[in-house]
Amino acid sequence: MSEAAIGVIGGSGLYELPGMTDVRWKRLRTPFGDPSDEFCVGRVGSQPVVFLSRHGRGHPLMPSELNFRANIWGLKSLGAEWVISISAVGSMKESIRPLDLVIPDQFVDMTKRRISTFFGEGIVGHVGMAEPICADLATILEKSARQAGARVHRGGTYVCIEGPQFSTKAESRVYRSWGVDVIGMTNMPEVKLAREAELCYTTLALATDYDVWHETEEPVSVEAVIRNLMQNVATAKDVLARAIPQIAPPRTCACPRLLEHAIITDPQSIPLTARRRLELLVGKYLPAEKKGRRRA
């Protein structure tokens, strides 16, 4: 796809994007393994869109089984410059009610077994995470959510746990004492990798429950989550239908230049295999490859 595209990662309950035309399915093999599913490439109106079901169609993949690097690399390779991440979450605050939408702007990573960077094996890069989401894209989502009649909260902190189990009450109380707003299992390391890929990334979080901390509400259950999730997904589809037509180049935010000063390794010391593996991400910042250079 040569045009700048809008990437949509569908979370639990959102396994397809309605309204897409010129649909083609693309199966990719990436330098980091297989993505969650084939990518659905097409258009919503006149906008090029790339859709990926995060858990795969039919939901066969647990959060811990997701190949986040392959998912983000695949979106980037298919021309995505913006990524909207749809994610089911639990609310950690009374003011965020089930069925509300949240556009978090901060994240706390409590995952334990996930690879969280494209770098390594001969090339080191350090990307700033102080402002992990694209404020420009978040503004479009907030406006679209309000137009859709949703109750939406702009800003807040998303704590990401490993899962697949929900939190204990003790864990939930600890997270609440930190002042977090929502809890989920999938946005880390997704947001970190999106920053390394210089994508404009924003989460549209769908609150399904009050986790287990609430004294007057029943503890979170799969039945309650699914019931609220289906209603939230319908709202998310409405928000996406309104937001996508508003997203267009040029990108005037800092996101397209996040790696400009991030690579610490001396370019002459980067192994050829590492350079070629990350060419999609870092090629524009490295000097031209010398002919006859040995593979490391």
Image: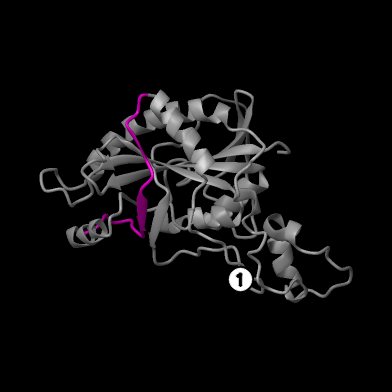
Q: Image quarter for residue 245?
A: top right
Q: Which residue is mark 1?
A: 120
What secondary structure is marked by label 1?
loop
Give residue 174's position: percent from left, percent from top: 23, 62
**Colour scheme of this structure image?**
one colour
Name, please, the residue furthest toward the left.
Answer: 216
In the image, residue 36 lies in the stretch drawn in magenta? no
Give residue 197's position: percent from left, percent from top: 61, 54
Q: Which residue is rendered at x = 54% and y = 43% of the image?
A: 83
Give residue 250's position: percent from left, percent from top: 67, 37
Q: Residues within 10 Å of mark 1 (few under 14, many from 20)?
A: few
Q: Is residue 183 visible?
A: yes
Q: Looking at the image, which is closer to me, 29 or 139?
A: 139
Q: Looking at the image, which is closer to me, 155 or 233?
A: 155
Give residue 61's position: percent from left, percent from top: 43, 51
Q: Looking at the image, which is closer to me, 246 or 74?
A: 246
The range drawn in magenta is: 149-168
Q: Quadrant of the C terminus?
A: bottom right
As displayed, is residue 42 above or below residue 271?
A: above
* Side (left or right) of 27 relative to 153: right
As displayed, is residue 264 above or below residue 196?
A: below
Q: Which residue is rendered at x = 57% and y = 62% of the image?
A: 127
Three-letter residue code for mark 1: Gly
* Side (left or right) of 70 relative to 150: right
Q: Which residue is rendered at x = 43% and y = 34% of the image?
A: 142
Q: Image quarter for residue 99?
A: top left
* Side (left or right) of 30 relative to 145: right
Q: Is residue 67 visible?
A: no
